[in-house]
Amino acid sequence: QVQVVESGGGLVQAGDSLRLSCAASGRTLSNYYLGWFRRAPGKEREFVASIRWNGLTTYYASSVKGRFTISRDSAKNTVYLQMESLKVEDTATYYCAARVVSGISYGYWGQGTQVTVSS
């Protein structure tokens, strides 16, 4: 079992920055990917970014590449999503999730944190 808890959401203006945090606990995370997903009102949940816990592999959705950066602090068991140049269309509930490296789907999810970007 892995538990993940998101924090850091809020209301910002377009062009602002925001950093989300995902505190992970439970099993040793070295064999896990931690990912960020988001769901905007009326839309399907979509992948945003992921990082293998060893920090050597990251992936980004094309819509956020170059603006968002995923990183992790192994000492704090925390994954971050640094979001720059936020757009109104980034407004969504952001979820942190974890999956085993050898797995296919993310099986451990947080409750989500709301990010609202105003124009």
Image (spheres, rainbow, N blue to C red):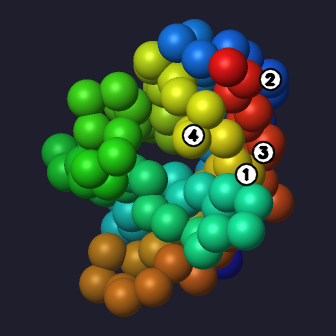
Report which residue position mark 4 lands on. 90
Q: Residue furthest left?
A: 56
The answer to whether mark 4 and mark 3 are in CB contact below 8 A is no
Q: Quadrant of residue 40?
A: bottom right
User: Does dot 4 land on a helix, a strand or a loop?
Assistant: helix
Residue type, numbered disc 1: Thr
Residue type, numbered disc 4: Asp
User: Does dot 3 land on a helix, a strand or a loop?
Assistant: strand
Who comes first in sequence, dot 2 or dot 3? Answer: 2
Residue type, numbered disc 3: Thr
| Quarter of the image where the C terminus is located | top right
Who comes first in sequence, dot 1 or dot 2? Answer: 2
**Above/below status of 61 relative to 117:** below
Residue type, numbered disc 2: Leu
Disc 1 to disc 2, C-alpha distance: 12 Å
Residue under the image location 79 percent in, 42 percent down: 114
The answer to whether mark 1 and mark 3 are in CB contact below 8 A is yes
Disc 4 to disc 3, C-alpha distance: 13 Å
Disc 2 to disc 3, C-alpha distance: 11 Å
Q: Quadrant of residue 97?
A: bottom right
Report which residue position mark 1 lands on. 93
Report which residue position mark 3 lands on. 113
Q: Is residue 10 left or right of residue 89?
A: right
User: Does dot 2 land on a helix, a strand or a loop?
Assistant: strand
Residue under the image location 59 percent in, 23 percent down: 19
Q: Is residue 43 left or right of residue 28?
A: right
Report which residue position mark 2 lands on. 11
Crowding at dot 2, Cα within 10 Å, few <14 / some 14-19 / many 20+, comes out as few
